[in-house]
């Protein structure tokens, strides 16, 4: 379990670093390619973070006092992830002169594609309501 929480801590730090760096990067650097690359990194980090969360989830029942669970680390990083996605999408839309309410991700050519799905809070609530195995086998 400690190895998994260490992986999540590292990935959470990487997501926070992306958010901080985005806010500090000068506007001229923020091109379509910049947004595509950053959003791609966000998705890679989040995918791994979410995968390790799935592996950690059974431990929440046996070790709820562990700081990882007691301090709601998943929810905290989820907020950073959602903020990054919305910020990157919004700024890219402004760059291209478009707007959209869809959740977005990048494809290999740096363009955005729709990947709408449940947000972190909904997914976490689903785990709490249906149990780990039900959520795991439902395809979420």
Image (cartoon, rainbow, N blue to C red):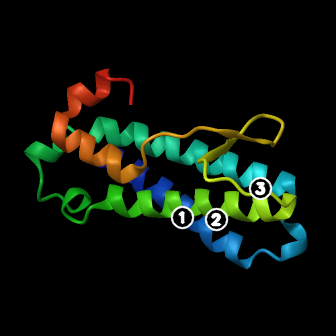
Looking at this view, name the residue that lies furthest to the left.
62
- The residue to which callout 1 is attached is 83
| Circle on res. 87 | 2
Q: Secondary structure at mark 2?
A: helix
From mark 2 to mark 1, how far is it between C-alphas? 6 Å
- Determine crowd level at label 1: few under 14, some 14-19, many 20+ residues with C-alpha closer than 10 A: few
Q: Position of residue 86 (x, y in %)?
A: 60, 60
Q: Position of residue 38 (x, y in %)?
A: 71, 54
Q: Secondary structure at mark 3?
A: helix
Q: Are marks 2 and 1 in contact (CB under 8 Å)?
A: yes
Q: Does label 1 or label 3 sit earlier along the sequence? A: 3
| Circle on res. 35 | 3
Q: Residue at x 27, y 61 (%)?
A: 72
Q: Secondary structure at mark 1?
A: helix
**Residue in front for this viewpoint, 83 or 95:** 95
From mark 1 to mark 3, how far is it between C-alphas? 14 Å
Q: Is residue 78 visible?
A: yes
């Amino acid at each position: 379990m400690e190895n998994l929480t260490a992986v999540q801590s590292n990935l959470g730090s990487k997501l926070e670093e992306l958010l901080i760096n985005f806010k500090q990067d000068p506007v001229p650097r923020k091109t379509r390619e910049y947004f595509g690359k950053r959003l791609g990194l966000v998705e890679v980090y989040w995918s791994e973070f979410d995968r390790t969360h799935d592996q950690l989830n059974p431990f929440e029942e046996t070790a709820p006092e562990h700081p990882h669970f007691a301090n709601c680390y998943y929810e905290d990083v989820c907020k950073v992830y959602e903020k990054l996605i919305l910020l990157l999408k919004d700024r890219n839309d402004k760059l291209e002169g478009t707007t959209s309410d869809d959740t977005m991700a990048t494809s290999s050519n740096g363009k955005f594609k729709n990947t709408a799905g449940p947000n972190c809070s909904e997914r976490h609530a689903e785990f709490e309501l249906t149990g780990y195995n039900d959520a795991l086998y439902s395809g979420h």
